[in-house]
Amino acid sequence: TLFRSQHYKQLDRDLLLFGAVFHDIGKVWELTFDTQIGYSDVGRLVGHIPLGSELIEKKTKEISNFPYDLKNILKHLVLSHHGQLEYGSPKRPKFLEAMVVGMIDDLDSKINTVESFMGSQMHEDQKWTGYSSMFDRYFYLEILRKKR
């Protein structure tokens, strides 16, 4: 699972799983997948976060008596998953599960960015990367080299 539910008993596992699966669902319409990955018109004009929220709105209307509060909680998981307004979230997380989804998304992004940067810096006898201004540090390459 994504976390040890016995350790974080206060977290709602269903909300975390929903957030993990659906936080980027709008990318299905935001991105194009022709000969290369690009952005669709609706992706550039609206973006994946509002598109995901619109999908939740549409699908919950199709379920009779879907709880209004739950619909808004699910939409909030999508709307807040970038964590901060300056990162593109229309809303900042307002409950613990929304914070966790945003933190995991941020962690995933940072791990991928660092791994890509380190991979691009792998030169023969070099033990360290060049300076990363994004992360304000050098990275040690020997551990990554041993894993490859």
Image (cartoon, grey):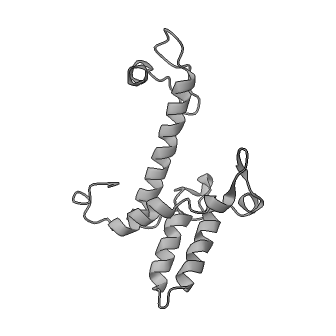
Residue 88 horizontal side relative to residue 139, left or right? right
Give me the residue at 32% from left, 55% from top.
Answer: 1
Give me the residue at 52% from left, 61% from top.
Answer: 23
Residue 4, horizontal then vertical, whole percent: 26, 55
Q: Quadrant of the C terminus?
A: top left
Give me the residue at 45% from left, 85% from top.
Answer: 67
Residue 86, horizontal then vertical, whole percent: 61, 53
Please determine whether, in this image, residue 140 is positioned above or below residue 38: above
Q: Nearer the viewer, residue 36 or 49?
A: 36
Question: In this view, which residue lies farthest toward the bottom?
Answer: 65
Residue 65 horizontal side relative to residue 25, left or right? left
Please determine whether, in this image, residue 44 is positioned above or below residue 76: above
Please determine whether, in this image, residue 112 is positioned above or below residue 132: below
Give me the residue at 43% from left, 51% from top.
Answer: 104
Question: In this view, which residue lies farthest toward the top?
Answer: 125
Quarter of the figure with residue 13: bottom left
Residue 120, horizontal then vertical, whole percent: 57, 24
